[in-house]
Every structure is written in structure tokens, then in C-alpha cells.
Image (cartoon, coloured by chain):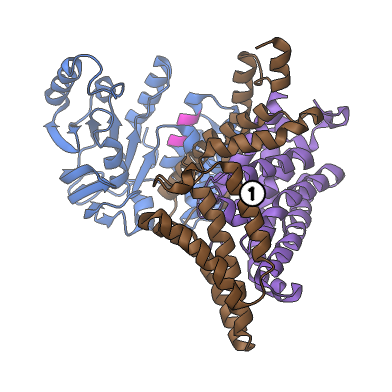
Amino acid sequence: MKIWPDRTITADGAQAHIRLQGVSCSFGDKVVLPELSLDLAERRVGVVGRNGSGKSTLARLIAGLIAPDAGRVLINDVDVLRDRRGAVETVGFLFQNPDHQIIFPTVEEELAFGLTQLGQSKAAARAKARAMLAHFGKADWAPRAVATLSQGQRHLVCLMAVLAMQPAVILLDEPFSGLDIPTTRALRRYLDQIEPALIQITHDPAALEGYDRVLWLDEGRVRADGAPDEVLPAFRAAMETEEGGDAGTDLAG
Amino acid sequence: MLALTSPVETPFHRLPAGVKLLFLAGFTLAVFQVERPVAMLLPVAFVAGAYLAAGRSFLWQGAAALRPLWPFVAVILAWHAVTREIAIGLTLSGRILATVALANLVTMTTRLDDLVAVVTALLSPLERLGVKPRVIGFAIALVIRFTPVLIGKGQALAEAWRARSPRRPRWNIVTPVTLAALDDAEHVAEALRARGGLPAGSTERKRHGT
Amino acid sequence: MERNLVLIALFAALIAALGLVPTITLMSGVPISAQSLGVMLCGTVLGARKGALAVLLFLLLVALGLPLLAGGRGGLGVFVSPTAGFLVGFPVAAFVTGAIVEKLRAVPLMWAAMIGAFLGGVIALYIPGIIGMAITLGKSLAEASALALPFIPGDLVKVGIAGLVTSAIARARPGSLLSRSSARAKGPR
């Protein structure tokens, strides 16, 4: 399902070229990412790690939503922190909880929002929103109140709202949390088909099946980086044997 | 969400809350009677002395709390300099600083639960009119619990806005935050009913013999 | 009974949250505090009585020393500062706003909310506000009014926003708009 077949491809044939150059980030005294330099050009990239490993911070840095203490982040040569307009056209972000993301009361308004912010007229934005809904087979959702949709349906609305901006890459922050298995599979099917590159943050290895590259983030550093069948078994093994009892988990202290 | 009580221990922390409040009320009324700048030096010096007695870090906190007043003081002094009534300007500035600073001192040296106890005691005569002090205590706890939740929602929505717009968030964010307040209220009310309703007032407790 | 109390508490929290999250920028890019917008919404959504109670609860918490005023201010000091009159005006503003929304049923909600927000959140708020400034700053009412003038455009913007937000809420949660609920005539629950 090529949603927007007129997507620009970068010079080296990649959908999106993400470059982190000497990026470090701390909150107060806590150093979340000591220093990171990365080059991502794969179509499907996963980032795994425990809670608190810096995955969400990394995702927000890549999207330009938070400022690094040092270094910079470039996506297709757009400085995502300084060029917010370019950033918003290049990188999308799907937040974990749709209720923290949906601003407008109706589906159509929510989808049209990003487009009007980029300067399109309300009419043009609404037309594109309706086209997007039709493409997903949900044309009747346009006037519906978001409040009447189920959890899974709201996740889909958020995805469509991000897709409407035609980004080169989308960051997914734990996109399947709280969804039941059939809904997860359905959302997964949609995600597999969309054109933009995906960077998925997750603590669940099963969600990265079929991905091109996986990074394992541990206390802000890249502990492993490679194909899923190299990184994920080691990650799974480490998760299952790490720290007996509560120590080192969220339950300690 | 932390109250403005200072963690720095001072001798004033040990005074009973009611005493401090009464003193503050009397002091404020008295200061409003003072007309001359020279006489105003007395309350200003008194309050400054109290802060100094409490220690340097406390003094810094107190000074920071007075910062929002500087625009007003500046306006007063400039105004009265222009109308050649400097004496009045100084008196007024001193009054504002002394009263606000002493009130802040009381706030910084009194714990939240002590103040709640004073409020509960003051409201107990109204019980016959249907005001239940324990219910007020519960309401206070609810506000403290949910303010950070609603702030968090506002911040998350602002972040979601910035992810799709190069412009700063606009008023549209207010609607979902308000809806969150309404929805959270429904959920909490439901949870309350499931646990037997509101905490009983003291009169009801006496009736049940507890 | 639980529902009323909890709504009042949550809206007190809303006033605090709207003061502490920077949400609105005027056309020129100057951020203005949405806190008085929260006061207006207490009136337009909860109605006169419950709206005023929500604001009173909010003020009680500020007096108890919680940093709930815009900019993280709070404590007893703000009740003797030059802006104290506005704090006194807050519950009056919510009450007047709510009363207008309740009474003007023939008027469509958005307009009633705007009228209420203006008469309550601006007129009824600024009267005690200006009196308070006049007393603490030792100025005449006319002089204090001049000092308050620059803030009025921002508050007029909030009046418009109050109308839009209230009607959006009515569409999203029709049952939650207590100021226009049909069960009102039955008396306190």
C-alpha cells in the first residue's frame, strides 16, 4: 500500500538518512545519553532496552523535540532542532498514548492539523485528510468524535495524522502498549506497508520481527548494533537472567 | 507537588501556626496605618531582621519570593519621583515589601498539615451549616494529587503539537486538558463510590461511636 | 454528592495546571497565562455555585502555601500583594460567568459563554482587582485602572477562547456541562 507514491528518495537511495553527531543529553545531574554518534539509513530500525535506558530520550532527540546538550541531529540534512519547519516535514512521532497526542475533537480536524500548520489551506488540508481516511478504508471516520473511538482506533488515527505530513521517517514510541493481540497484529500490518522509514522504540523483541537493524541501548550507550537475529537473542537472554529478585528493576527502592 | 514550606529549619518553624497567622494579621493591619517613611523603617527592619535570624539560605529564598514585586515597587518609586513625593513612594514601597515578606515568612516556616489543621479548626463551627471539615481535607488532597496529572497532560499535548507544527502551541490545547479534568473527575467519583463514598465528618464519627 | 465534590476539586487543579503550563501566545508571540481562562471555564462549565467553589478551593490551596499561581507563586504573601484584588475577584468572576451561562439559555452556548466570560472574567474581575491595586499602591482608582489597562487585550482574547473551548466541551461531553444541565431545577444533589 504505497500511500504517497511521490515520496522524495535521498541520493543514496535511502528513504531517510539520520545522523547523530556527538549527541549527549542530561536532565539535571542525571546523564541519560553520555555521547552518541549514529548513522541510520535502514528502512526498519528497532531500538530495544530496559526502561530508563534512554530510548525515549533518543527518540525525542531524533525528532527534535528536545535539545541535546552537545552535538546535533540531522535527518536528510535537516537540523531537526533548529529547523523546526523542515523537521516537521521530515520526521513524524507516534507517541505511546493516543490520549496524550490527540488534540482535536474530530478525526478530520486531527488529521488536517499538521497540514494547516505547514501553510496549506483548510480546504486542501481537509481534502487530504479525507483521502488518507479513504485509503485506509475509514472514510466514514471523518466527522466522528475521537472520544467515540476505541483505544486501537485512536492509535490508527494518530498514525494517520502523522502519515498525512508525508514524513521521510517516523519514530514509534512503544506503539503497541495496551493493545490486545489482534489489534497489535492489525496495527503491525499497517505499519509494515507504509512508505516512510520507521524507528521503533520497544522493550519487546517480538515487535521487531522482520526489521533491518536493531540497536540495544543500555544506560545511554549502544551495547549492540546489528541484524535482529544477532542482537535480539542476546538481549532476550540478558533480560531473563538479569538481577535476581527486585534489585535493578523498577520495583527496587 | 511541593508546598512552599522551606526545608531549611528556622526557629520560626517551631511556633504554632495559629500564633503566626494572628501575628501576621495584626502586623499587616498595623503597617497599613503607618504614614511616614521614617516610621516605616521599623516594620521593614523587623521583617528583615526575622529573615536574617533564620539564616542566609533562607534569606535568599525569601528574596527570590519577592521578585514579582519589583515591577510594582519600580512603578511606585518612579511615579512618586516624578510627582516629587518621594516620601510617599518610600512609605508605600516599604509597606508592600514588609507585608508581603512577612506573609511569605509565615508560609515558608509553616507546614502544610499544620495549616490544614488550622483551617479545619476554623471551619468546625460551620459544621452545623453543612460544611464538613474532613471533606475539605479530602478536596485539598485531590487538588494536590491531580494538579501534576493535568500539568503532565498539558505538557504531553504541547509536545505532540510541537511534533507536528513549527509554531508554538495555541489555545486548542486547553480543550483536551479540560476534558481530562472532566474524565478524571468521573473516574475518581466512581472509585469513591466503590469504596463507600466520602470520608465521614466528625459529627458522623461521633454518632458511629468511633 | 461525590461527583460534585470531585468535579470542584479537579477544576481547582485545572486552574493551577493552566497557570503552570505555557499554552497561549498572543499574536505578537507574547505568552499570556491561561490561569484566568481556567477561572472562566469553572463558571462556563460548572455553573455559578460549583464554579465559585472550585475557585475558592483553589485560593485556599494557594493560601496554604502551594505554588499554584502562574509563575509558581503562592503562599500568604500574594494575598497582601498589589495583585491581591484579582485573587478576591476570581471567585466572583467564576460566579458571574456561571450565572450568565445558566440564565441565558436562549442564547447559543458559545455566545453565552463569551458574554459570561466577559462580564465575569473581565468586568467582575477587574473591579476588585483595580480596587486592590489602588489600596496597596496608594493610588486613586483612575490611576490604578491605567496600570491595569495593558492586561485587558490579553483577557479579551481569553474571553473568545473561553467561548470556543466551552462549546467544544459541550460537543465532546454533552452530559458534563453542568451549567446547562436540565437536571438543575431539581435542587442540590
Range of residues picked out in magenta: A154-159
**For the point 56% across and 40% down, which residue is it?**
B177
Which residue is more in the foreground, C132 or C93? C132
Above/below status of A158 relative to A88: above
On the image, the x and y values in percent for residue A86 come to 35, 56
Q: Chain of mark 1?
A: B
- From the top left corner, tell me how far across and down residue C114 is, in percent: 75, 53
Q: Drawn colour of chain A?
A: blue
Residue found 66% across the figure and 28% down from its top: B135
Magenta run includes residue A155? yes
* Residue A227, percent from left and from top: 14, 28
Indicate the chain coloured purple by its letter.
C
- The furthest residue to the top: B209
Q: Amino acid at mark 1?
A: Leu
Left or right relative to A33: residue A118: right
Q: Which residue is mark 1?
A: B22
